[in-house]
Amino acid sequence: MSKAALSKFWIARFAIAILAGCLLMACEKSSDAASIAESMPNATEAQREMIRRMEQTAPPTLNGVQLYTGPERTPTTTKGLTIVGYNYTDTAITNFSVGGAGGGNIEVSSRSYSYGGGACCAPIPQEKPLPIPVEIKWQRDGIGERPWCKQTVLLTGPMPKEANYFEVHFYQDGTIQVAITDYPSRPRVLMDRYSPALRKASGNVNNDTQHARCGNE
């Protein structure tokens, strides 16, 4: 192999190694960030173009998390997933939905009351590589205007052998986590409550807008 050919071979190997490392770390490049190709002065224009194409076809991300990476997948059968909600926040949720499918209402959780909802069915695609984004929409109890809030979260693994329930966990800091389970889980947070509608008699906090888009429809 000639010196020129050998040089081109190692440049290509180096570029592929850099890109592979970037993808494994699920790095997210902004649209105006410099291409790796521009940092390789000895590469030919054809090699730089190949690197740019590889960068453009990298897996999409959501909030810095790479999507569609596998090997975990959604179950082969996801029809009939019952939606259940866990409300660790300070006020009751009168309505919530998963991807447009209604989940019902959820009281404020307590040490004896765990989850609410129980509606059918979560519209989760079958045999889809994980993680996948899921839109959660909800409305609070209260007097006067009650805005709807939306938050897109990631459904990750592991997946159960039997998929029966789709859990939505609302946390006090405004974050939401989801999971597919074979049976409703125990609450992840155990707290006392003043009433089914309120965590405390006064001083309750609503952090919905910390991670969601809220407004009147």
Image (spheres, grey):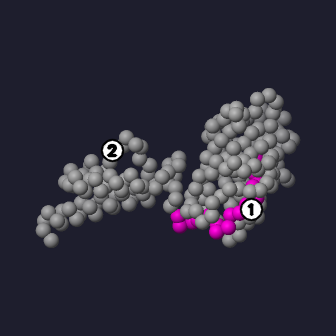
Quick check: 149 above or below 8? above
Taking the spot 37% from the left edge, 41% from the top edge, the residue there is: 32
Q: Residue furthest top?
A: 144
Residue on which the image places disc 2: 34
User: Residue 22 vs residue 99: left or right?
Assistant: left
**Residue 178: x percent and y percent?**
67, 54
| Numbered mark located on residue 80 in the image | 1
Residue 180 location, quadrant: bottom right
Taking the spot 12% from the left edge, 68% from the top edge, the residue there is: 2
Real-space Cα separation, disc 2 to disc 1, in angstroms:
46 Å
Neighbor class of circle 2 (other Cα within 10 Å; few <14, some 14-19, many 20+) is few
- Confirm whether the magenta stretch covers residue 86: yes
In which quadrant of the rendered image does the C terminus lie? Answer: top right
**Residue 129: x percent and y percent?**
55, 62
User: Residue 9 vs residue 167: left or right?
Assistant: left
Quick check: 53 above or below 173? below
| Numbered mark located on residue 29 in the image | none
